Structure formats: structure tokens, C-alpha cells
Amino acid sequence: MPLPPHRRIPPVRRLRLPLAVLLGLALLGLVAGTGLALGGKEGGQRAAARPLPAGAAASPLPEPVRPAAEALPFDLPAVKTLHASGKKVYAHYFTPYPLSLDNEAPGADYYARDYLRPEGESGKHAAYGGLLRDRPRPVAPGGGDWRRANLEREVRTARDAGLDGFTVDLLSLSGPNWGRVKLLMAAAHTVDPEFRIVLMPDMVGLAATDPGTLAARLAELAASPAAGRFPDGRLVVSPFKAEAKDPGWWRQVLDTLRTRHGTDAALLPVFLNFPAHADGFAPLSEGFSEWGNRSYTTQGGATADVTRAKDLGKLWMQPVSVQDARPNQGVYDEAGNTATLRASWQAAIDTDADWVQLTTWNDYSEGTHFAPSLHNGYTYLDLSSYYLTRFKTGDWPRIVRDTVYVTSRTQFAAATGGPGAAKVMRLRGNSAPARDTVEALAFLSAPAAVRVLQDGATKEERLNTGVHPLLVPLRTGFATGEIWRDGTRTASVRTAYPVEARPKVQDLQYYGVSSGRTGTTAGE
């Protein structure tokens, strides 16, 4: 049976149906053993960490990395300069996956115990090798209000990378995920009053919600000074899969916000099928967006979409993505190492989009995350900052530090996992063909030689100043990317995880490392 076209399908843990919502409300009193409860002991005290079961995926605290000022290949403009641009960049924040779910040590926390291993959560994800293949970059347990402190850390990380805010997925209107939304908005205002949280009702999760209830909840969030607004002051309501409800339904939401709650708002709908719904939603909308595709060969429709939006007098929020691999849904897209990230950012730049949405900041169940993670470090967020600077300023930043980013999978695309894998990921029908490659993406401040070294193989090319991907076939073992100039190695980094010929779990994400963050740089 052919796979469906690209669309966002909720991960297993999202509660979608009315019965599930009631169940979720009944579970609110539970604490950290579920990994989802916001409540806890008074004063933010932690329950004693449970031992990590045999065979669990360890997630130790990572080694310190260099700060962006030393790690990026260019000098990132000041935050105030980037925020002053009329071009806005947001990242889609997915509330089920904060930095920590239970404030336990990362080697024995909920991510390590129950999300990253096949036996986790009483084996409910065993058929596909576990729910997740990556997790947020581990943090040490904190004291006091650790939940808010962790959200403030995420806001600070995004802000310092040049982002203007988050588009927050409103999965439900009560319960733990709703609580995280409110806490995120408070955290954002504390860290930076200019960092905005755009409200994104998820119309898969909220399918049974009536217009009045949604309007009341949106008005509650709109009271926060962090709520995203259009330049004229109207609240931005940016529903995911907006076409799940017709324009008349959304008109009721907007009218209720205005007449009952005193909140003027306009839509910026995110569609799964923009061309089919643009005209119907135009009278209610200040702008448009779509969820987009996740393969580098499927970015060609951006020009037509932006043209259509601007012909209707609307702004356009372009989706920018890095990759997509969903074990629990049995599907993945071929990202081509960093090709999808570069192609989708280039589409935003070439079409003169008004806003950008990084899809996503932290949806680890779909493998679409830009946020710093256990397996990718800061690789994808750092690369995004380079294109973000061009998008916001209109000029490509000058490369001042040789830097090499190495990306590869840790297994071959044909891998299916161990004998217990009953469900495997298959390539989406509209994706680029699967490939097995290592990419060294070199940022060169002057002409230099770029090398990729693998066990028993070396490839070298002399390249000019600029950004250059160097591809080599994937081999088992580790890969190292290097930059050499005048007999001196100016940058080097080795992959953190080896490529295995017979992996126990299917994992088709591209892992990334950066010479600027964790490798060697000039003079070392």
C-alpha cells in the first residue's frame, strides 16, 4: 500500500478523542512517574531517581561546548539587530518534549528509561524499537522551579540563535501540555520581553472543540505580554491544519474573541493543502502558511505559494525543515544530509517570504528538531543561524572562521533493525530516493582543502571561499571532516557515533557534529 502524502500525524502520546481528554484530566494528579505531569513536590523537590533498567540507552550529561561567538563560522549580529528586522523567524514548539520530564539525572530519566529504548513504557513501543531516536540535549537536575528554569533556558537558546519566538502547538486546552504553554509564555517574557509566543491551535487534537471554548482559552493566553501579535496589535491565531474547520467556524472564533473577550485577532492558518483553501480563508487571514515537505527535492512549490499569498495581499510564513523520520508511524523522508535544511532555507530567501517557521523546534517523535539534542548537538540550529542572518539582513554573512559540519546516519538506509522489529520505516512516496552518504559541509574563510576520512578511505577536494558540501559514500565506523590550508589543519571534527552494519534498532535520522562546537579549530 502506498504511503500517504506528507502530513503531520500526531505521535502516540497525544490524547486526541474526547474519551482520551477525560482520561488525561483524571491523570493530572499523577507526578513524575508518567513523565508528563507538571505537578510535583512543593518547592520543586525531586522524587528519588529510579535505576536504569538493563539495556537502556544512557544519556549522560554532554561535555561543554564552545559558545556561539567562537563556534559559528560567522559573527552573528546582535539580537536587537535581528529582532529589528521585519522578517520574522519562529520555531514550532511541541510541548510533550521539554528539556526534562521528571528532573532526574539524564542517564536514568524518563527519556532514557522509557522513550529511547524498545522496552520503555512497558513495551508499548517495542514493535518499532522505542518511541524516540533522539532527545533534548541533557541537562542536570535543577532545584526550585526547575520546569520554568528549563523553559527559560530553551527560550534563551532560541533567542541567542536569532529566533524571534516560538509557534506553540496547543495540543489541548487543559492538562499538562496546556500548563507548559502558560509556563512557556511566562518564561519567554522573563528572558526577553521581545521574544514572542505565537498561538497555534492543533486542529487534530482540538477537533472536538467548539468555537466558544477555543476563543475563551485563546483570550486567556492573549493576556500574556508574550503573546504574538501582528504589527497592528491584533492577536496572531495560527492554527495547524486550519482546513479541519471551515471559514465560518473560524469566523465564530474571531467574533467571540472580539465581542466576548475584547481581543481583536486575525488568522495566519497553517494548511496541509494551501492551494485548495487560500481563497476561502482570505477574508479572515492576515497571512498564510503550510506545513511543508521534508525532502530537498520537494521544495519547488514555494514560489507558487508565496506568489498566491501576495496576490491575495497576505504575508507568507515559509516552512523550513531539516529532516523527518517517524518510527511509530513507519515513514521517513530522505533529507540528503543537510540538503533539505539548505534547500528549504534557500526557498524562503529566494521567494522573499515574510516569516519563517522552523518545523520543528523539538518534536523528537518525528525527528524534525532543530533544538540542541543528544545526537546532533547544536549542528542544525547553528546552520540555521547562518541562513537566518541572510534572510533577516539581506546579506550573506562573511565567513571568518573555518568550520566543518559532518552529518551521516549511523546505519544504512536499508537497515530494518533487529529481529523484534515488527514495524519499520519506509520512504515516503514523494521523497527523494534514499541514499547512504557522509557530508562534510565546509565553511571556508579562504580557499582550502576539505577532507573526509573514513576507515580505509579518504577523499579530498580543494575548494574556494564559501560554503561547500563534500559527499562520500557511507562506510561502517567513524568519519572525520577536516579543513587544511598551507599545511595547517584549521578545523576538524569526528562523528560521535559509529556507522553499524547490523543495528539493533532502525534509526534513519542524520546525526550531526560541528568542529566549532566540539572539534578542533585553528591553532589547536
Image: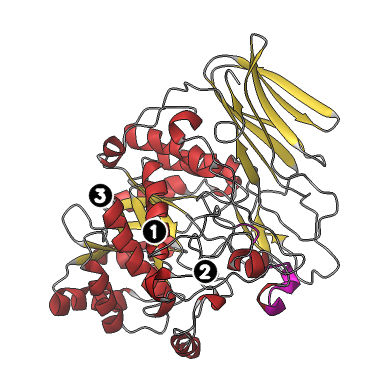
For label 1, the SS is helix
Look at discs 1 and 3 and give the one toward the viewer. 1
Which label number is shown at residue 102? 2
| In magenta segment, residue 129 | yes
Residue at 39% in and 69% down? 180
**In front here: 85 or 365?**
365
Quick check: can you spot residue 146? yes
Give the mark, 2 or 1, whose residue is nearer the N terminus. 2
For label 2, the SS is loop
- Per the rendered image, the range of residues in magenta is 122-134
Q: Quadrant of the N terminus?
A: bottom right
- Name the residue type under label 2: Asp
510 w.r.t. 292: above or below = above
Is 50 on the left or on the right of 193, as rendered?
right
Is 186 on the left or on the right of 69, as rendered?
left
478 w.r.t. 172: above or below = above
513 w.r.t. 183: above or below = above
Q: CA distance from mark 2 to mark 1?
A: 13 Å
Quick check: can you spot residue 3? no
Is 414 on the left or on the right of 224, as rendered?
right
- Residue 164: x and y in percent read 33, 48
**In front here: 220 or 71?**
71
- Name the residue type under label 1: Ala
Look at discs 2 and 3 and give the one toward the viewer. 2
Residue 281 image-quadrant placement: bottom left
Q: Are marks 2 and 1 in contact (CB under 8 Å)?
A: no
- Residue 412: x and y in percent read 79, 49
User: Mark 3 = which residue?
Assistant: 194
- Residue 13: x and y in percent read 56, 75
- Name the residue type under label 3: Glu
